[in-house]
Image (cartoon, grey):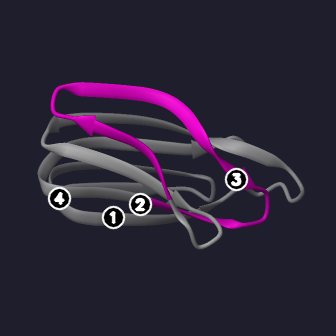
Amino acid sequence: GLIRNQTSHSCKASFKSLEGELVFKIKKTEVGTEGSIKYSITAEEGEIRLYYDIFGVKEHLATVKAGETVEDSGGYVEGGYQVYIIIEAEEKSRGSVSVELDN
């Protein structure tokens, strides 16, 4: 099963079996501001990779292996631009990902 939740500037996904990728489109709403991406990833099984894409370039944020949890922030976002959040798993993975742009 897959549970997805999304607002304009945040997204969450919880999955029992993810193989492939999930893509969310979010935006830092305040134009003319800069910020980073706050994320929390838990991998119960397999390996989960988190990327973001703001200007057509896919950038790696984190890789989490089975049994690990990571809470951090990184990346660079500008207000007013769409940000694609990409969650990838090459093999069947179970876990959760939560992402928020500081607004």
Q: Which of 44/3 is in front?
A: 44
**Side of 96 relative to 15 (left or right):** right
Question: Would residue 1 be visible to someone looking at this image?
Answer: no
Mark pair 3, 2: CA separation: 15 Å
Q: Nearer the viewer, mark 2 or mark 4?
A: 4
Residue pictured at 56% horizontal, 56% vertical: 7
Callout 1 secondary element: strand
Disc marking residue 77: 3
Count of marks placed on residues:
4
Residue contact between numbered discs 2 and 1, judged by CB atoms under 8 Å = yes
Callout 2 secondary element: strand
User: Which residue is identified by label 4?
Assistant: 90
Amino acid type at mark 2: Ile
Q: Position of residue 89 (x, y in %)?
A: 22, 55
User: Which residue is identified by label 1?
Assistant: 22
Residue pictured at 43% horizontal, 42% vertical: 98
**Side of 92 relative to 97 (left or right):** left
For residue 70, what is the image quadrant?
Answer: top left
Q: Position of residue 30 (x, y in %)?
A: 83, 54
User: Which residue is identified by label 2?
Assistant: 86
Question: Would residue 82 be visible to someone looking at this image?
Answer: yes
